[in-house]
Image (cartoon, coloured by chain):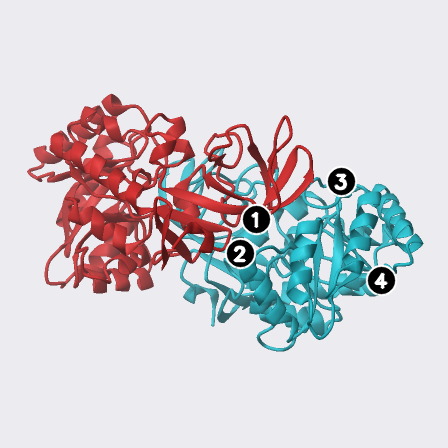
Chain colours: A red, B cyan
Amino acid sequence: MSLDGIDTPAVLVDLDKAEANIRAFQAYADRHGLKVRPHIKTHKLPRLAAYQVAQGAVGITCQKVSEAEAMVVGGEVDDVLITYNILGEKKLRRLRALSERIRLSVVADNLVVAEGLSATFRGAEGPLDVLVECNTGADRCGVESPEAAAELAKAIEAMPGLRFAGLMTYPPIGKPGAVADWLGRAKALIEAEGIGVPTISSGGSPDIWKAHEMPLATEYRVGTYVYNDGFLVGQGTCAWEDCALTVLATVVSVPAENRAVIDAGSKVLTSDLLGLEGHGRILGRPDLAIDQLSEEHGRIVSEGPVGLAVGQRLRIVPNHACVVSNMLDQVELVRGETYLGSTPVAARGKVW
Amino acid sequence: MSLDGIDTPAVLVDLDKAEANIRAFQAYADRHGLKVRPHIKTHKLPRLAAYQVAQGAVGITCQKVSEAEAMVVGGEVDDVLITYNILGEKKLRRLRALSERIRLSVVADNLVVAEGLSATFRGAEGPLDVLVECNTGADRCGVESPEAAAELAKAIEAMPGLRFAGLMTYPPIGKPGAVADWLGRAKALIEAEGIGVPTISSGGSPDIWKAHEMPLATEYRVGTYVYNDGFLVGQGTCAWEDCALTVLATVVSVPAENRAVIDAGSKVLTSDLLGLEGHGRILGRPDLAIDQLSEEHGRIVSEGPVGLAVGQRLRIVPNHACVVSNMLDQVELVRGETYLGSTPVAARGKVW
């Protein structure tokens, strides 16, 4: 089938490009002896998670229990790290059920979370692996110092039903040296207590090709690399040609000489700017800017004549691929200009 | 049931407040002899569309054919205006099928769209009502001048299968006088051709209480008024107490004295700022700011101690209610502090 059969707006995933992106980073990580644990938040598709594992990933990363549930249905993925403080009875019950089907690990950055996990896994067949999340400069979650990491590691190791499994961080972009210092100090403090640190998990797509500069990491979590996007092109991580996810849109109005309107607004492209100008790059027309989105409209403006006709179709690389993946119930799979059909976004909207 | 049974993050809709908002604007419009045609993009729920019609709305507004399909299932709504340039064979086929079940009208701002509609409705039992969309200053879609409106109206009236039904605009905020001039001139030009202008449809929630200042309008389209949000509070349209949609979130980490992290990120609150600072208002804690969102995390910062504990729940009024409605497959219905249960967001993600 050709792409002409796809109704717009649509999210297109070029499997040739996505698979090439997966293989390229796996090859790099293999060269540097680094395990790969892709974050599925970008694609949310079991088939791409299975491909990642088939190419050599040790397992996958999810942010939520419900995402993990959606990813392990097919049986190809049997090792999941959930990099989130899991709290609350319902989520903990689902986590325990999931742990009986696959190898599972989670993170914690505080005692309340660790105690909830312990209460849930006390009496389970084996202990739950818990990594301590470390704030190495991104200032989101994570214990604030190597000393605090060691203290929490010790507490976790002592809790029934849990086993301390290592350190996890989402490092600030471009500072591998400072991160290595931080994690090295935490590791030494924990080992001084006679506790092993089998895993140090780092991640982030902007710095994927510098992952080896922080040799302390045993594994690397990457999400956006599978599709790439305008943000990563801006960071120098990839080229426009490496972008596997595009939005297909139709021009529905050309009301003025230097303005046109497409049928993709914030319900598809999202309002994420990530510091960029405009709401995506129109392939083949770098002279045009999508300067404004409402929910169902994207406004295109140009300095000179816009040169678009009502009914014309455009492909757009969004600023941020992960959030676009979360907007529609299905994506359209393509290989180059061949349309393979649609597939449900299995982990879309999974926030629990 | 109490709200404690709701897993977070969740989108809560207080039906008491939503219904009061619906009644308040209906009463205002009734006083001024203005028909109300609510835009369902904000709630996307058939039950609230039915309530709007039961309170006196003449019908509803949708942006997409697929939204209209989702809204008319129950039979309570039988009059829909789709304020969108509808293009393409698939959408036109669905539009024709829909027209056989309900009273339907659409808009067009160009000949390509009008010709597609005509080709689809040629030979239908009755003509399709088409309003001409007018750009009265919002600079999105719409013909650019009263003269262009008259020309397109004349063309539509002459096309088989179509009937010119009036003028439609999404006016710029706060300029009712200029809009009245524009539409008055267009109306006069069209009537001079011997064509009637039965409907003039205006809309927009920020200016709802000034709708009567543009007396040329016969009907008014309103979306956000049903829930209200931080943007409308900022515009002076409503108070925080009138906000019917809130996000319920749990504090999952308090990593530093002046920082906490909640389990609602851009996958729930969205990145829409609409010119506001921060990503939503935490009810009861106006001293706190949500300064940063990642997909599953919202970061709360404070000048002094943040004063939050892991596990604590917060309710947040988002910047923009309509886009939040589109993020989760379900919303939780409440009346005050009583939890009624969840309901699917029937028109979520409907972009076709």
Is the Cβ of the residue at disc 4 closer than 8 Å to that at disc 1?
no
Mark 4 crowdedness (10 Å alpha carbons): few <14, some 14-19, many ≥20: few
Q: How many marks?
A: 4
> Is disc 1 in the same subunit as disc 3?
no
Mark 1 crowdedness (10 Å alpha carbons): few <14, some 14-19, many ≥20: many
Mark 4 element type: loop
Between the C-alphas of marks 4 and 3, the distance is 22 Å
Indicate which disc residue B154 carries. none
Q: Is residue B313 left or right of residue B119?
A: left
Residue at the disc numbered 2: B351
Q: Earlier in the sequence, mark 2 or mark 4?
A: 4
- Mark 1 or 3, closer to the camera: 1
- Which amino acid, mark 3? Gly
Is the Cβ of the residue at disc 2 closer than 8 Å to that at disc 3?
no
Residue at the disc numbered 1: A263
Assign the N terminus of chain A to one quadrant of the image.
bottom left
Between the C-alphas of marks 2 and 4, the distance is 29 Å
Q: Is residue B139 left or right of residue B344?
A: right
Q: Is residue B169 left or right of residue A130?
A: right
Write down the chain letter for disc 2.
Answer: B
